[in-house]
């Protein structure tokens, strides 16, 4: 299938270093996809993705949901992790076993055995959605890595340094790619360029990114 193939990494199984402790694991999640998609639909039912407002008053173009013991939210009051969905008052849906299995296997592959995430952010991007350059620093122990899984239409990660103004690299990510960021790379600025118009055979006009974290 010439067209569908374009959505997947041309070199599945390859490990690319983005920094001393940051790796792209090309195609690492592909074998998990049939088990991930039904769980994703269940999360979407229990805690629909929503466009959060930043403390600065902007509405995010990315729509966010969460699963796991803790979920990340933003409002005019700031960013934080909470045990309950502020929209419903219910606990976030539990992290599916297959999500945990994938996150742990990817972390181990990148040198972080025993990763025990308690939070999983589920970002939804339609074409045009983007994530501006930021650091992930709301987690308690910055010694713990972050595992990111990309599904659906492709995107380009922007990956900078420890200061907002440091030079950046661009890294294309495809359906099934996993990125692990730890150690000296954990606080690097990063973002996602506006997603280009495309339609994925399984997910349609959508990119989903899970990020697994140890929040507390
Ligand atoms: C580099 N998500 O949710 S994951 C986020 O594709 C987030 O949805 C993006 O950034 C997405 O906060 C990118 C890539 C990522 C995640 C954490 C990092 C890159 C990172 C932590 C340190 C350095
Ligand atoms: Fe981030």
Image: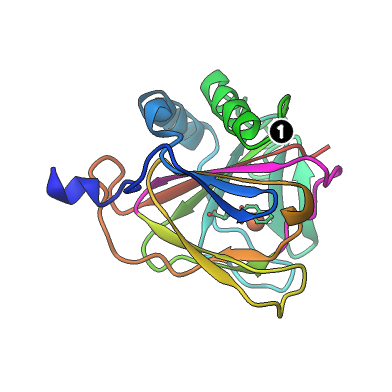
Give percent across and percent down for residue 38: 39, 26
Q: Quadrant of residue 185?
A: bottom right
**Residue closer to the observer: 31 or 83:** 31
* Label 1 SS: loop
Residue segment shown in magenta: 135-153
Q: Quadrant of residue 173?
A: bottom left
Pointer 1: residues within 10 angstroms few (<14), some, or many (20+)? some
Q: Horizontal placement of 133 versus 118: left or right?
A: left
Residue at the spot 36% in from the left edge and 63% down from the top edge: 127
Q: Main secondary structure of the magenta part?
A: loop
Q: Which residue is mark 1?
A: 112
**Residue closer to the observer: 206 or 73:** 206
Give percent across and percent down for residue 59: 58, 68
Give percent across and percent down for residue 208: 45, 47
Q: Horizontal placement of 89 versus 96: left or right?
A: right
The quarter of the rendered structure image containing the N terminus is top left
- Please say whether residue 195 is one of the residues in the magenta stretch: no
Give percent across and percent down for residue 151: 41, 44
Q: Horizontal placement of 143 versus 157: left or right?
A: right
């Amino acid at each position: 299938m010439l067209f569908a193939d374009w959505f997947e990494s041309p070199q599945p199984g390859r490990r690319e270093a983005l920094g001393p402790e940051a790796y792209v694991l090309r195609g690492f999640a592909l074998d998990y996809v049939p088990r991930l998609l039904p769980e994703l639909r269940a999360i979407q039912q229990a805690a629909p993705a929503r466009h959060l407002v930043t403390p600065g008053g902007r509405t995010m173009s990315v729509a966010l949901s969460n699963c796991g013991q803790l979920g990340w939210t933003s409002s005019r009051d700031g960013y934080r992790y909470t045990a309950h969905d502020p929209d419903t008052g219910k606990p976030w849906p539990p992290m599916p076993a297959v999500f945990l299995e994938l996150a742990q296997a990817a972390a181990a592959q990148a040198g972080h055995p025993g990763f025990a995430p308690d939070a999983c952010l589920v970002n939804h991007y339609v074409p045009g959605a983007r994530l501006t350059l930021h650091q992930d620093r709301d987690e308690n122990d910055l010694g713990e890595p972050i595992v990111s899984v990309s599904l659906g239409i492709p995107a380009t990660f922007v990956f900078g340094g420890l200061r907002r103004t440091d030079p950046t690299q661009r890294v294309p990510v495809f359906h099934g790619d996993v990125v692990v960021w730890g150690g000296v790379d954990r606080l690097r600025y990063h973002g996602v360029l506006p997603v280009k118009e495309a339609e994925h055979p399984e997910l349609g006009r959508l990119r989903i990114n899970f990020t697994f974290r140890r929040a507390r």
